Amino acid sequence: MKQLKKIISVAAIILTYTKATAQSDDSLFYRHSVQLNVAGLGIERWAAAYEYRMSPKHALFFQGGGSFPYLSEEKEYGFGLHYRYFFKPVKNAKFLWLFKSAYKNSFADFNVRYMNLVDGIYKDAESTYEAFFVGAGIGQNWVWNSGFTIRYWVGYGPPLSGEYKWKNTVPDNGDQWAKTYKWASGLDFGLSFGYSFGNYNKR
């Protein structure tokens, strides 16, 4: 949680700096971006992403991540390919009713994801879980003229395959835990800070 607080503090400083340069620039609608998803820091997970903007409304979003090596007792990794459709942008929109951005827009998300819990731990019992997901979601995106971006999204996609397995012993209420874990594993959410650059290749 301390890491998350530090990142949010840095973001607030950047937002204060960019507040004075909030005039819209239409070229920002066409930019690619790199992003760091901080939503999982509280559970010792990291994720990084690249978004390729094919047009002002269409983009491909690639994300990968997992557990922190040497910090998390569990070992996990995963990745996903997302198609995102961006709705009409709103210029000079405010983030948290305070920081004026160049623009904000909402988007719809359709994705295929994969995760592999190589070594999970529950009540000192070890487990594994591997699954694919197909899901959908919604989110919002803020962009500043400096290139700084903030984005959040939430969605869900049920596991298409996968079985939660205990390696050695099954703890008390282990079966219920496995069912709950499989249901929850389909959640897709994010809060990312990033940087946008360049323009999509106009033809």
Image: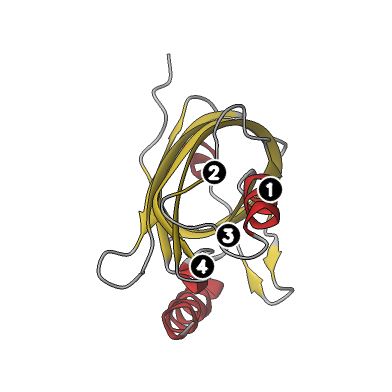
Q: Are marks 4 and 3 in contact (CB under 8 Å)?
A: yes
Foreground pick, 186 / 165? 165
Upstream in sequence: badge 1 or badge 2? 2
Drawn side of residue 131 relative to residue 188, left or right? left
Which of discs 3 and 2 lies nearer the camera? The answer is: 2
Instruction: Identify the image quadrant of the C terminus.
Output: top left
Quadrant in the picture for residue 74: bottom left
Of the residues shown, which amino acid type is indicated by label 1? Lys
Q: Dot 3, crowdedness within 10 Å: few (<14), some or many (≥20)?
A: some
Q: Residue shown at 39%/23% (left/top)? A: 201
Dot 3 corresponds to which residue? 23
- Give the spatial CA distance, label 2 vs label 4: 50 Å
Q: Where is residue 115 in the image (x, y as percent from the top left)?
A: 46, 41
Q: Residue shown at 46%/82% (left/top)? A: 13
Q: Position of residue 136 (x, y in %)?
A: 69, 34
Drawn side of residue 65 relative to residue 129, left or right? left
Dot 4 corresponds to which residue? 21
Q: Is mark 3 on a helix, strand or loop?
A: loop
Q: Are marks 1 and 2 in contact (CB under 8 Å)?
A: yes
Of the residues shown, which amino acid type is indicated by label 4? Thr
Of the residues shown, which amino acid type is indicated by label 2? Tyr
Q: What residue occupies the far front of the structure in this picture? A: 169
Dot 2 corresponds to which residue? 164
Which of discs 2 and 4 lies nearer the camera? The answer is: 2
Dot 1 corresponds to which residue? 179
